[in-house]
């Protein structure tokens, strides 16, 4: 069961999220707030796994919330909402500690997919919130990554499991695990979130 806090200054938006998460088992909204300060206060008093927060809140933004929660309660994961398809904001949010980034026009099923991914420790960056991470055919691959490692890294921001990546690439999840471990060593990162950040920052270009 994913315990979720909803932080947004628009009551109608929070109402819609409540409805989306109430349609299926596995989600429980444990609190709501309108400001970044509400997010920090609720996280200190309510057992929550995930905070969904608007990136554009003021005076404390969603990115500020990510930074503070990483310092105060690192086990709480954050998904930020953005009204803009802005690669810079996405990178800034992930660097601040966000595990997920979603546009406000996303489908209900994608909202639930993002929560499931983040709840199990996988980053989830909606496709409209990231640039094309591919490399052109024949381009020199950075970090001495193999073509297979590049393909695995390209799929990381989608929040897929090793098995789901394997299904897309036609190999086993153990093969994906091996490719990912090798790629992470070459990138000198320790976690999937750090690898995703590297992809968003253009390590495949």
Image: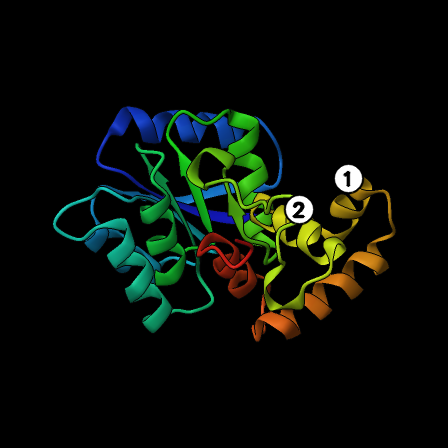
Q: Which of the 4 image quarters holds residue 76?
A: bottom left
Badge 2 element? loop
x and y, in percent, of residue 43 in the image: 34, 59
Q: Nearer the viewer, mark 2 or mark 1?
A: 1
Q: Residue at x 63, y 59 (%)?
A: 141
Q: Residue at x 38, y 48 (%)?
A: 90
Circle 2: is it few (<14), some (14-19), or many (20+) Cα within 10 Å?
A: some
On residue 152, the disc is none
Q: Which of the 4 image quarters holds residue 12?
A: top left
x and y, in percent, of residue 145 in the image: 68, 63
User: Which of the two residues, 125 or 184, is positioned nearer the viewer here?
Assistant: 184
Badge 1 element? helix
Residue ID for mark 2:
160
Q: In this figure, what is the number of numbered marks?
A: 2
Residue ID for mark 1:
168
Query: Above or below — where is 201 with respect to 55?
Result: below
Does residue 167 appear anywhere in the picture?
A: yes
57 lies left or right of 194? left
x and y, in percent, of residue 45 in the image: 33, 61
20 lies left or right of 40? right
Q: Residue at x 28, y 50 (%)?
A: 62
Circle 1: is it few (<14), some (14-19), or many (20+) Cα within 10 Å?
A: few
x and y, in percent, of residue 157 in the image: 56, 48
Q: CA distance from mark 2 to mark 1?
A: 10 Å
113 lies left or right of 11? right
**N-terminal-most mark, 2 or 1:** 2
User: Which of the two residues, 93 or 81, is positioned nearer the viewer here?
Assistant: 93
Does residue 44 appear anywhere in the picture?
A: no
The image's colour scheme reads rainbow
Asked if the residue at tag 1 contacts the one at tag 2, i.e. Cβ–Cβ closer than 8 Å, the answer is yes
189 lies left or right of 55? right
């Amino acid at each position: 069961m994913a315990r979720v806090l909803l932080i947004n200054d628009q009551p109608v938006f929070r109402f819609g999220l409540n409805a989306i998460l109430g349609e299926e088992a596995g989600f429980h909204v444990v609190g709501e707030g309108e400001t970044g300060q509400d997010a920090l206060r609720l996280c200190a008093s309510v057992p929550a796994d995930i905070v969904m927060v608007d990136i554009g809140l003021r005076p404390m933004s969603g990115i500020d919330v990510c930074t503070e929660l990483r310092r105060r309660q690192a086990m709480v994961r954050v998904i930020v909402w953005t009204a803009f398809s802005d690669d810079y904001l996405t990178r800034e949010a992930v660097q601040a500690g966000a595990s997920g980034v979603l546009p406000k026009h996303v489908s209900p099923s994608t909202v639930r997919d993002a929560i499931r991914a983040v709840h199990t420790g996988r980053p989830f960056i909606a496709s409209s919130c990231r640039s094309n991470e591919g490399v052109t055919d024949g381009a020199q691959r950075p970090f001495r990554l193999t073509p297979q490692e590049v393909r695995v890294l390209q799929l990381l921001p989608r929040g897929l499991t090793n098995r789901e990546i394997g299904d897309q690439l036609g190999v086993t999840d153990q093969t994906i695990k091996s490719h990912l471990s090798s790629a992470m060593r070459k990138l000198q990162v320790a976690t999937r979130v750090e690898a995703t950040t590297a992809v968003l920052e253009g390590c495949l270009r």
